[in-house]
Image (tube, rainbow, N blue to C red):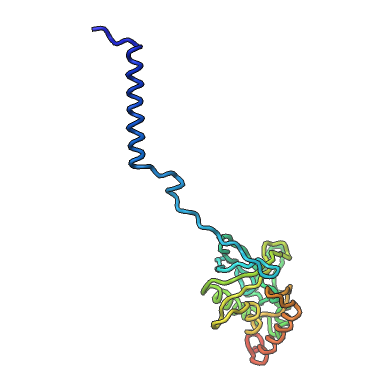
Amino acid sequence: MRPPSRSSVIPILILAAAIFLWVFDTYRQASPTRTVAETRQPAETSPRPSRTGGYETFHGCTLAPDRGNDGDSFRVKLPDGRTEIIRLYFVDTPESAFKSYGGGENNHRRIAEQAADMGGISPQQAVAIGKKAKAFTLGALGKSAFTIHTAWDSPFNDERYHAFVEFTAEGKPRFLHELLVEKGLARIHTKGAPLPDGTSARKQKDRLMKLQSIAKANESGAWGL
């Protein structure tokens, strides 16, 4: 028997290919495959910061672990997942430890200045207050989410940005820097700025001076040593 000629095989191959494509298309329509995009979870949309006065306002911030976290400077996690180190306006809490750095530098002189500004306490007492301030700040911000208001100014170009921190304390919104002064855990120092609601820096400093007077009268924090 003679084998089929090439001319007779080609139509058979074309017919077989057509049948295969028809079967494949029918199967795909009956049971469609999922695309890569369909198999991924939808990306969570990061909330954009709002604007309050001259500041960007981030709600729902949380405290982020960092060995440098202190009473007035700490790392926060923003709602979009970024972490930034923020520094409080208006106040300076004492150093929470005596430290020595390379080249013979240390923070002892700064601690002595802080001690003098907080009623003339000893450097050792100032460090003790610094530890209390650190515990208060990290404890308060570690409990629940909080809000920061910042203009992203970094006075020392060290990626620490000034900010106001607002959170709920005793059932009402409070600014962290005010509470630190009220509790005698910080001196009124460093850069001031208008509050997010437009209150001038001058008026805010006057309020802080009143809060400091209350702390002195109540012998709170450093003022009770």
Looking at the rendered image, the quarter that the C terminus falls into is: bottom right
Instruction: Name the quadrant containing residue 167.
Output: bottom right
Name the foreground residue: 224 vs 78: 78
The residue at the far bottom in this view is 217
Q: Residue at x 69, y 66 (%)?
A: 151
| Image spot of residue 1 (x, y percent) | 23, 7
Q: Is residue 57 visible?
A: yes
Instruction: Name the quadrant containing residue 137.
Output: bottom right
The residue at the far left in this view is 1
Q: Is residue 124 visible?
A: no
Name the foreground residue: 201 vs 62: 201
The residue at the far right in this view is 202
Position above or below: 63 against 33: below
The residue at the far top in this view is 2
| Image spot of residue 115 (x, y percent) | 70, 81
Looking at the image, residue 127 sits to the left or right of residue 18; the answer is right
Name the foreground residue: 91 vs 5: 5
Looking at the image, residue 217 sits to the left or right of residue 32; the answer is right
Instruction: Name the quadrant containing residue 93.
Output: bottom right
Q: Residue at x 71, y 68 (%)?
A: 54
Position above or below: 69 against 216: above
Name the foreground residue: 27 vs 212: 27
How many numbered discs? 0
Looking at the image, residue 34 sits to the left or right of residue 95; the answer is left
Q: Residue at x 60, y 77 (%)?
A: 131
| Image spot of residue 34 (x, y percent) | 40, 44
| Image spot of residue 63 (x, y percent) | 56, 68
